[in-house]
Amino acid sequence: MTGGVIFVAAPLFSRYFPQAMPGFSMEALLVVALLLLPLGMVGFHALQSPSYGRLGRAGFWMALAGPVTVALGAASYLYLGNVFGTSLVWLATAVGPLLLVAGFALYGVATLQARVLPRWCGVAFIVALPVALVLSIPLSFASLFIVFGLVWLALGYALWSQRGVSAQQPSRVR
């Protein structure tokens, strides 16, 4: 949930309260939020892993690699300049977002199949990033992070509300 809060707060604070965060840029906070996404995914994985198969595992690993790739590329560009050339920036702008979209889509399908979380969680994994990207075109780039952060807040609440509930293997028909 913390990543969702940062995704929502960073663009709002940098625009409306720039003096509230001296020394912090919106981009730096977004790198932190990106690095928190894999922690949330580990929570979802711990809850659902007995209930989904290879599709869920593939989506999980892609959803872990995507934000880390984007964050490393963005951090290298923000803090180190162009020290590593364009290779890390290329990872942050091309490979990382593809891993994010594909990983969340696969993980969303696996979530729908596992039936451990409410159905809307699987749909949210599938549509959150594409919808946020589409909305950022007519609105502003900051809206991408606000929409994505609000979805992650809702997903974090769904995960939090499932604490103490053990994932059960779905019964199989023979």
Image (cartoon, helix red, strand yellow):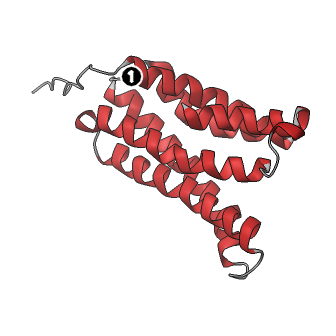
Q: In which quarter of the image is residue 140?
A: top right
Residue type for callout 1: Leu
Q: Nearer the viewer, residue 146 or 171?
A: 146
Q: Which of 98 and 9 is in front in this view?
A: 9
Residue 132 at what x, y percent from top left?
Answer: 72, 36
Instruction: Name the residue rendered at 88%, 34% in the picture.
Output: 17
Instruction: Name the residue rendered at 53%, 45% in the picture.
Output: 36
Residue 171 at what x, y percent from top left?
Answer: 16, 23
- Compared across the picture, whether 50 is left or right of 65 comes to left
- The image quadrant where one finds the N terminus is top right
Instruction: Name the residue rendered at 68%, 70% in the picture.
Output: 76
Residue 55 at what x, y percent from top left?
Answer: 36, 46
Q: Is residue 93 above or below residue 29?
A: below
Instruction: Name the residue rendered at 66%, 37% in the picture.
Output: 6
Q: Which of 48 and 102 is in front in this view?
A: 48
Residue 42 shows in the view: yes
- Compared across the picture, whether 158 is left or right of 68 comes to left
Question: What residue is pinned by disc 1?
Answer: 117
All told, the count of numbered labels is: 1
Residue 170 at what x, y percent from top left?
Answer: 20, 25
- The image quadrant where one finds the C terminus is top left
- Compared across the picture, whether 35 is left or right of 55 comes to right
Q: In which quarter of the image is residue 107?
A: top left
Dot 1 alpha-carbon crowd within 10 angstroms: few under 14, some 14 to 19, many 20 or more: many
- Compared across the picture, whether 32 is left or right of 25 comes to left
Residue 138 shows in the view: no
Q: Name, please, the residue furthest toward the left.
A: 174
Q: Nearer the viewer, residue 64 or 72?
A: 72
Q: Is residue 168 above or below residue 139?
A: above
- Find numbered disc 1 in the image and state the secondary structure of the residue it sits on: loop
